[in-house]
Amino acid sequence: MAEQGSQVHGVDLDSQTRCAHYHSALDVIAIRMKCCGVYYACKDCHDALAGHASQVWSRSEWDQPAVVLCGACGTELSIRQYLDCANQCPNCKAAFNPKCSNHYHFYFAMDDMPVQEASSSI
Ligand SMILES: [Zn+2]
Ligand SMILES: [Zn+2]
Ligand SMILES: [Zn+2]
């Protein structure tokens, strides 16, 4: 079982990195947190266990390898690979939760600029 060196931390983890917070069939990814370099099943697990504030990956780090882990097969992806994979593991074709996109900003800076109210009237 422990052939990968990528230990994932989390609350009530199962074998595919589902945690106490996100545990649908699709919630199989883990993310290496920038602040401590440790894989967590989700940010809430990090906040519950790490004892420090989380940091997000900046956009210039999107090509850094091994930031997102597919809990189904153990493949590690860069942020860019993950965002480009259309919510499906490029290796094992496991489906990822598309709703994770609501949470990207907890993990990845989606822009170099601070997020602000969009002036969407244009
Ligand atoms: Zn941390
Ligand atoms: Zn969690
Ligand atoms: Zn996979």
Image: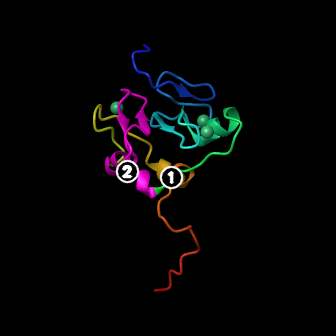
What residue do we see at 47% from left, 64% from top? 111
* Residue lying furthest bottom: 122
Q: Earlier in the sequence, mark 1 or mark 2?
A: 2
Q: Secondary structure at mark 1?
A: helix
Q: Which residues are magenta?
A: 59-85
Front in this rendered view, residue 41 or 19 = 41
Q: In which quadrant of the rendered image does the C terminus lie? A: bottom left
Please tell me in which quadrant of the rendered image residue 46 appears.
top right
Front in this rendered view, residue 78 or 30 = 78
Q: Report if residue 69 lies within the magenta region.
A: yes
Please provide percent x and percent y for residue 115: 56, 67
Q: Secondary structure at mark 2?
A: helix
What residue do we see at 52% from left, 30% from top? 18
What residue do we see at 40% from left, 47% from top? 79
Residue identified by numbered label 2: 83
* Residue lying furthest top: 1
Q: How many marks?
A: 2
What residue do we see at 53% from left, 36% from top? 37
Ligand 2 appears in which quadrant?
A: top right
* Image position of 119 with respect to 79: above or below: below
* Image position of 40 with respect to 12: above or below: below
Give yes or no for contact between labels 1 and 2 (Cβ–Cβ under 8 Å).
Answer: yes
Please provide percent x and percent y for residue 92: 29, 31
Q: In which quadrant of the rendered image does the N terminus lie? A: top left
> Can residue 39 be spotted in the picture?
yes
Q: Which mark is residue 104?
A: 1
Please provide percent x and percent y for residue 25: 46, 33
Structural distance between the alpha carbons of marks 1 and 2? 10 Å
